[in-house]
């Protein structure tokens, strides 16, 4: 079993650390935030990620937390970099935290391998390699090992990955990093460093392309009277296309997609190539987030003074993460239109909301006297939204379903005006044996 240091106690670092410890490795997680390290030492987990708290507790004897680089690296054979790489104003990735880690490495005697988990532009590995050499750390290896964890399912994604990608300058380094995953059944893709970096960016870009594509199909469905949930089911059953990431809605968000797609577009541009398709994928998503405002206006007229309940603030269910959440764009637009906005989310923090927007933990409080309810995050708690209780609480029983969570005919039968995304035709009775559109696996 190996000794692993992990730099960064965010979503990626904590999940990676907990899962490696669960595989039997000894892990030290290092962060620069004293408060975060104190919390973790006291057994408190600063983020909401299903299964993480249990995994950290179960493996406490193989996991420690520190502020100190020397302590993290003491005896370590691998140092994983799991720090943030947020976008800069120009859309490039900001690698400041990555460079801080590289520059914090002391002169080491041991044969360490630096493993990049953070998402970085293609070419970063080459630059870090050159920097390590010039710092007198030529004996420190470098491996790109991008992460494909999705928030809300990160622990499951680590233990059941579709693949592990390992890009290295030296085949032996790739083998050693791949061996850390022994015990996990998966395909290991071993490649050069630049290709591993590109696999990560291309994967996220492809996923966003699929979502923007189905969102445009949804928008056309609205005009021609088709139902995008049936269309996605029918399209996704083609084995060449597959069913995943074909859920139309208010658009994609989160801390990774926007940043990675724009980083790839910028990277192409900086290298002399205009990535037209990605420019459209991003633009479609920006417009998609705003389309719900148009739907509200067509139902309610001028939104000034209208009370709108925004249901779901987190960028997706099972997380408290609100980075790049579509809800925040929608709320901003609604406030600009003069609406009174109330928000509901079971765990998202209130501090991310603009002034004047109240956050409720009970959705009935948010809906009391509301002119419209907008489903922004498909929290399971909202499945029963079209209830008599909600209808009676609202001033005007209108549901705009930005995630196609509800059954339109059932919502209408319960006395609501209902608008989904791309659900142009009234639902027809399903012939027996037809899978429910909701059964499309994600
Ligand atoms: C995403 C990728 O799925 C991970 O593989 C990747 O490792 C991660 O980014 C990352 O780069 O760190 P994540 O952002 O956690 O994971 O969440 P997703 O489940 O991919 O959802 C992203 C957004 O797309 C959400 O806003 C979601 O609502 C939206 N989405 C997803 C749709 O609108 N429709 C879909 O069919 C699927």
Image: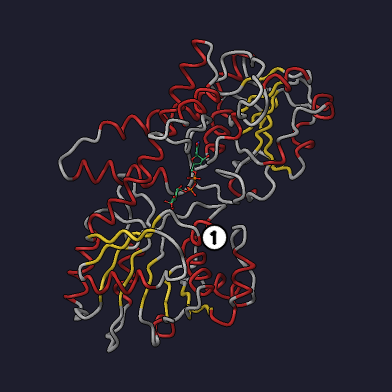
Q: Quadrant of residue 433?
A: top right
Query: Can you tell me whether the CB of the residue at mark 1 lies under 8 Å from the nearest atom of ligand 1?
Result: no
Q: How is the image coloured?
A: secondary structure
234 lies left or right of 284: right
Quadrant position of the N terminus in the picture: bottom left
Q: Quadrant of residue 85?
A: bottom left
Q: Position of residue 344 (x, y in %)?
A: 69, 40
Going 32% across and 48% down the picture, which residue do you hit?
Answer: 201
Count the labels in the image. 1
Label 1 element class: helix
Position of 316 relative to 168 (above/below): above
Q: Position of residue 154 (x, y in %)?
A: 52, 57
Going 22% across and 60% down the picture, which residue do you hit?
Answer: 192
Position of 402 relative to 77 (above/below): above
Going 47% across and 37% down the picture, which residue do you hit?
Answer: 245
Q: Dot 1: within a 10 Å radius of its alpha carbon, few (fewer than 14), some, or many (20 or more) residues?
A: many
Q: Position of residue 146 (x, y in %)?
A: 36, 59
Going 58% across and 82% down the picture, which residue do you hit?
Answer: 61
Residue corresponding to mark 1: 155
Position of 265 relative to 390 (above/below): below
Q: Quadrant of residue 392?
A: top right
101 lies left or right of 393: left
Q: Position of residue 346 (x, y in %)?
A: 70, 47
Position of 159 relative to 412 (above/below): below
167 lies left or right of 223: left
């Amino acid at each position: 079993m190996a000794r692993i240091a992990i730099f960064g106690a965010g979503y990626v670092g904590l999940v990676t650390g907990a899962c490696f410890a669960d595989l039997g490795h000894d892990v030290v997680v290092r962060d620069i935030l004293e408060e975060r390290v104190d919390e973790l030492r006291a057994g408190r987990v600063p983020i909401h990620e299903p299964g993480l708290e249990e995994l950290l507790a179960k493996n406490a004897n193989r996991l420690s937390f520190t502020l100190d680089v020397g302590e993290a690296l003491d005896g370590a054979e691998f140092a994983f970099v799991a720090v943030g790489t947020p976008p800069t104003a120009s859309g490039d990735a900001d690698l400041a935290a990555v460079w801080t880690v590289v520059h914090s490495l002391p002169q080491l005697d041991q044969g360490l391998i630096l493993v990049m988990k953070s998402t970085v532009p293609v070419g970063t590995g080459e630059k870090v390699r050159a920097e390590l050499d010039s710092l007198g750390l030529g004996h420190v290896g470098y491996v790109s090992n991008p992460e494909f964890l999705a928030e809300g399912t990160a622990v499951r994604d680590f233990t059941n990955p579709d693949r592990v990608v390992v890009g290295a300058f030296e085949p032996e380094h790739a083998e050693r990093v791949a061996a850390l995953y022994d015990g996990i059944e998966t395909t290991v893709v071993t490649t050069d460093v630049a290709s591993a970096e590109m696999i990560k960016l291309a994967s996220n870009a492809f996923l966003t392309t699929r979502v923007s594509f189905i969102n445009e199909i949804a928008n056309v469905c609205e005009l021609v009277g088709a139902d995008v949930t049936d269309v996605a089911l029918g399209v996704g059953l083609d084995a060449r296309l597959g069913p995943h990431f074909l859920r139309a809605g208010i658009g994609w968000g989160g801390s990774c997609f926007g940043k990675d797609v724009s980083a790839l577009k910028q990277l192409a541009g900086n290298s002399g190539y205009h990535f037209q398709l990605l420019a459209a994928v991003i633009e479609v998503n920006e417009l998609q987030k705003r389309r719900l405002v148009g739907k509200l206006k067509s139902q309610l007229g001028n939104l000034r003074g209208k009370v709108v309940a925004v249901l779901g603030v987190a960028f997706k269910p099972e997380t408290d993460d609100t980075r790049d959440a579509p809800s925040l764009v929608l709320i901003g637009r609604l406030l600009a239109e003069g609406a009174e906005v109330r928000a509901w989310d079971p765990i998202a923090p209130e501090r991310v909301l603009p002034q004047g927007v109240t956050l409720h933990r009970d959705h009935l409080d948010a809906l009391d006297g509301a002119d419209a309810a907008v489903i922004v995050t498909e929290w399971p708690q909202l499945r029963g939204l079209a209830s008599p209780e909600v209808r009676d609480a609202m001033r005007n029983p209108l549901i705009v379903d930005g995630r196609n969570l509800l059954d339109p005919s059932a919502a209408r039968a319960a006395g609501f005006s209902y608008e989904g995304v791309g659900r142009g035709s009234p639902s027809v009775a399903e012939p027996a044996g037809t899978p429910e559109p909701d059964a499309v696996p994600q």
